[in-house]
Amino acid sequence: PSSVALAMVGLIESLLTIPIVDKMTASQSDSQREVKAQGLANIITGFFGGQAGCAMIGQAVINVKSGGRKRLSTLISGITLLLFIFVFKSVMVAIPTAALIGIMMTVAVDTFDWESLQLFRTFEITEIVILLVTVGV
């Protein structure tokens, strides 16, 4: 069923995130431990009607670039976001959408690996066209 597909997608994204964060923090993670912990957490979450979760590359990179080095930093950022949503709701609603878009664009530009554009030199023109059409759609 679709739940198995979603679990696999989450698992793959988590496994892709681990080496990226390990490289950025000069540390070594235990992939087997991460897989077991994620599976157990998602099973327990399901009993409470919650939504499954996984490590996400973009959020992990932003967290590390912002100075987060331990797992606790992810928890604290989530709790802080919840506090802002529930406690400062009236303030959050007053923030213009354009300002939020500006923040999102800044984060996207800051987290993009600009050196990866050098790879375009090794691509054939047909590969570049396929890439641009895929991104454009």
Image (tube, rainbow, N blue to C red):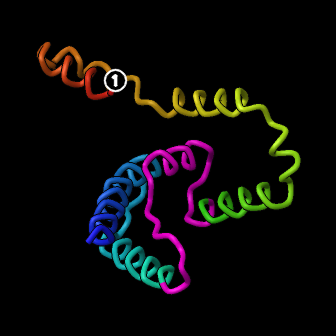
Identify the image quadrant of the C terminus. Answer: top left
Locate residue 112, reporting x and y percent: 45, 30
Q: Nearer the viewer, residue 100 or 114?
A: 100
Q: Quadrant of residue 93?
A: top right
Residue situated furthest front in the rendering: 1
Q: Position of residue 13 (x, y in %)?
A: 34, 56
Residue 126 falls left or right of residue 114: left
Residue 129 or 111: which is nearer the viewer?
Answer: 129
Residue at horizontal 37 percent and vertical 60 percent from the top: 14
Q: Nearer the viewer, residue 3 or 24?
A: 3
Q: Is residue 65 magenta?
A: yes
| Figure check: 80 above or below 118 | below
Identify residue type, mark 1: Gly
Query: Is residue 42 shown in magenta?
Result: no
* Spot occupied by residue 108 in the image (x, y as percentages of width and height): 52, 31
Residue shown at the point (46%, 79%) measured from the top left: 41
| Image position of 68 with respect to 134: above or below | below
Coordinates of residue 5 in the picture (x, y in percent): 27, 65
Q: In the drawing, does residue 30 fall left or right of residue 79?
A: left
Q: Residue at x 27, y 28 (%)?
A: 134
Q: Is residue 31 left or right of residue 111?
A: left
The image shows a total of numbered marks equal to 1
- The quadrant in which the N terminus is found is bottom left
Q: In this picture, which residue range is highlighted in magenta?
A: 47-73
Badge 1: residue crowd in 10 Å (few <14, some 14–19, many ≥20): few
| Disc 1 secondary structure class | helix
- Residue indicated by mark 1: 136
